[in-house]
Amino acid sequence: MLRAVILVTLLLLAVPPLAAQEWTAEQQEVVEWLNTFNETAYAGTADEFLAWIHPQFTGWSFAEEAPVEIALADTIGVGVPSDVVERCSAVRAAIGPHIPLRAHFHDTRNTGLANAFAAREVGVATLDASLAGIGGCPLAPTATGNIATEDLVYMLNRMQVEHAVDLDGLLDGAQWLQETLGRPVPSMLLKAGGFP
């Protein structure tokens, strides 16, 4: 199992059992990260994943561990929306309806936002993103950063999804980050601007 760094997190309107500020230290520690979208040694192909996921979860006592959520990650950016639907659905079937799912997508092959949309459509409660889309993956030197938070928030705004994230503030932060780094950042919204 892998741990990933969350640069900026966007909480959607799903059903986490507790607000983040109410989590105990013990609950925070049992948030599990599964690197499940990548077709690598961590998860294999989609068919291998589906065969692998069920024993992984049925062998673990969720009642005893009480995880706050289970996160699925594509840290090298190879997943496509059909992978997301298939694998998130397989995890949900294996763990039941009460533990929220989180998804973490890198935008290496320009599928990150589409994957985030697919994850939301199958009930993923939390989507990770990074300001201006910066970042990478230590396990895959060519992987790019997470999806840009401002790109994700723009999409959610246009879809009329309620959230508590200020898009203008994100754009100010992304602009500051680009100036501070002294180079263009991956954010598409920063380049193109918003649309009414």
Image (spheres, rainbow, N blue to C red):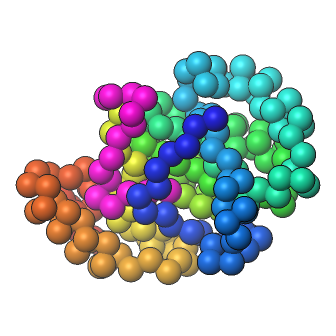
Q: Quadrant of residue 195?
A: bottom left
Residue at (91%, 55%) from the top-left corner?
63
Locate the C terminus and report the quarter of the image it occupies: bottom left
In this rendering, the answer to whether 31 lies above or below 165 is: above
As drawn, is 49 to the left or to the right of 2?
right
Q: Is residue 113 visible?
A: no
* Span shown in magenta: 128-142
As drawn, is 26 to the left or to the right of 167?
right
Q: Main secondary structure of the magenta part?
A: loop
Q: Quadrant of residue 94?
A: top right
Q: Quadrant of residue 82?
A: top right
Let me know if residue 100 is in the magenta part. no
- Count the marks: 0
x and y percentages locating residue 186 in the rendered image: 25, 50
Residue at (89%, 35%) from the top-left corner?
59
Q: Is residue 25 visible?
A: yes
In this rendering, the answer to whether 119 lies above or below 14 is: above
Locate the N terminus and report the quarter of the image it occupies: top right
x and y percentages locating residue 148 in the rendered image: 36, 56
Question: In terms of depth relative to the viewer, which is nearer, 84 or 55?
Answer: 55
Residue at (39%, 37%) from the top-left corner?
137
In this rendering, the answer to whether 152 lies above or below 164 is: above
Of all residues, the one furthest to the front in this rendering is 25
